[in-house]
Image: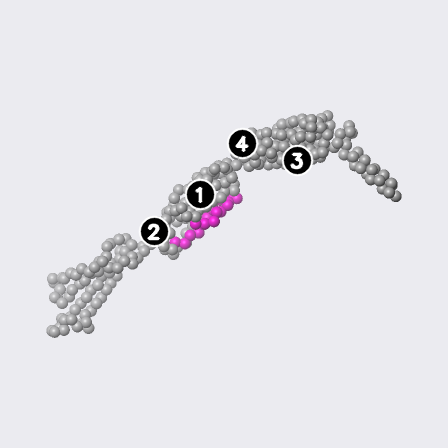
Amino acid sequence: MFFLAILLFSYCQMSQHIQKTTANGKEMLSNPKLVLVQGTSNVVMKQNVTLSCLSEPGSPPVRYTLFKHNQQVSALNRSDLTPALFTLTISSASDMGEYKCKAEYNNSSGGKYSNSLKITLIEPISKPVLSSPTSQAKKGQNVTLSCFSENGSLPITYLFFKGTQNISPQKTMRKREAAVIFLFIDSLSDFGTYKCKANNSFPNNTKYSNGFNFTLAEKFKSTRPPIGLTSTVNAEESENEVIYSEIEPVKPEEYINFCVIRREEEKGNLEDPDLTENTCTTKFLQ
């Protein structure tokens, strides 16, 4: 039984070896592997990339052919078990696309194809534009800001700032559309200069937008105390009527208070507070 098992094992090994050889005694090729050995699959214009194609196992010499969209690009013969190296210079958009390689023996039919490898072009982004549906805002209002770069390879990452401070998490857009944030105008300090920046996988290509400012659409009341009082006396009025005006510096966002104090004169009782009528009016400046 032991010797029978050894014979069966030897027979199986021999059968597998026969199945892996061609009619001329060479070992059958496996599907080659196509990989990047220099550069990246996302390339910039004028960049070089090197592709490696190798079929293991195989009996040299082996002919390797590189294709792009079923069109032959280049071919190499290898007399040993080292890979075929194809160096490409990306000089136009026509160099983009899917590449495959083929391994075959000379003077033989058929051959085996590799996996596909896609080469894509990355382009620098254009200067982003920061905008809002409204240029005016008032206290207590919700507003939006949009940042958009019209050109450049996707995805594009956007970041928003007020002054030099980051005001939102970065937003990565995988479609050609703007990044949008929502803001709440709570005080005058929210009326600063806003900017956004954009970048993509293109090296050293961060771009900043121009500054954007909201303008004030509603007046904010002044909380400063009165500066002083000025009195006027009308010569045609009775001697017991005096008008006092409370005056503050006139600014677009402030207001003026007018107060009239009337005193009825009675003999010996001019200082009686019960005989004093006090009327005040607030007038907002338009």
x, y percent for residue 178: 47, 45
* Label located before the other in sequence (4 or 2): 4
Label 4 vs 3, first from the N-terminus:
3
Residue at the disc numbered 4 = 47
Q: Secondary structure at mark 4?
A: loop
In magenta, the rendered stretch is: 167-185
Closer to the N terminus: mark 2 or mark 1? 1
Classify the position of the C terminus by image quarter. Answer: bottom left
Q: Quadrant of residue 37?
A: top right
Q: Residue at x 69, y 26 (%)?
A: 79
In percent of the image, x 62 and y 27: which residue is there?
74
Position of the N terminus by quadrant = top right
Question: Which residue is most to the right?
Answer: 1
Residue highlighted by disc 3: 33
Residue 268 % position (x, y): 12, 74
Q: Nearer the viewer, mark 2 or mark 3?
A: 3
What amino acid is at disc 2?
Leu
Direction front: furthest residue: 2
| Mark 1, residue position | 197
Horizontally, residue 135 falls left or right of residue 20, namely left
- Which amino acid, by three-letter code, is at mark 3? Lys
Quote the CA–CA distance across marks 2 and 1: 25 Å
Q: Is residue 184 magenta?
A: yes
Mark whose residue sits in front, 2 or 1: 1
* Residue picked out by circle 2: 216
Where is residue 6 shown, x and y percent of the image? Answer: 84, 40
Q: Are marks 2 and 1 in contact (CB under 8 Å)?
A: no
x, y percent for residue 191: 36, 50
Amino acid type at image mark 4: Gln
> Which mark sits nearer the N-terminus, 2 or 3?
3
- Mark 2–mark 3 contact, CB under 8 Å? no
Relative height, residue 26 to residue 144 (above, below): above
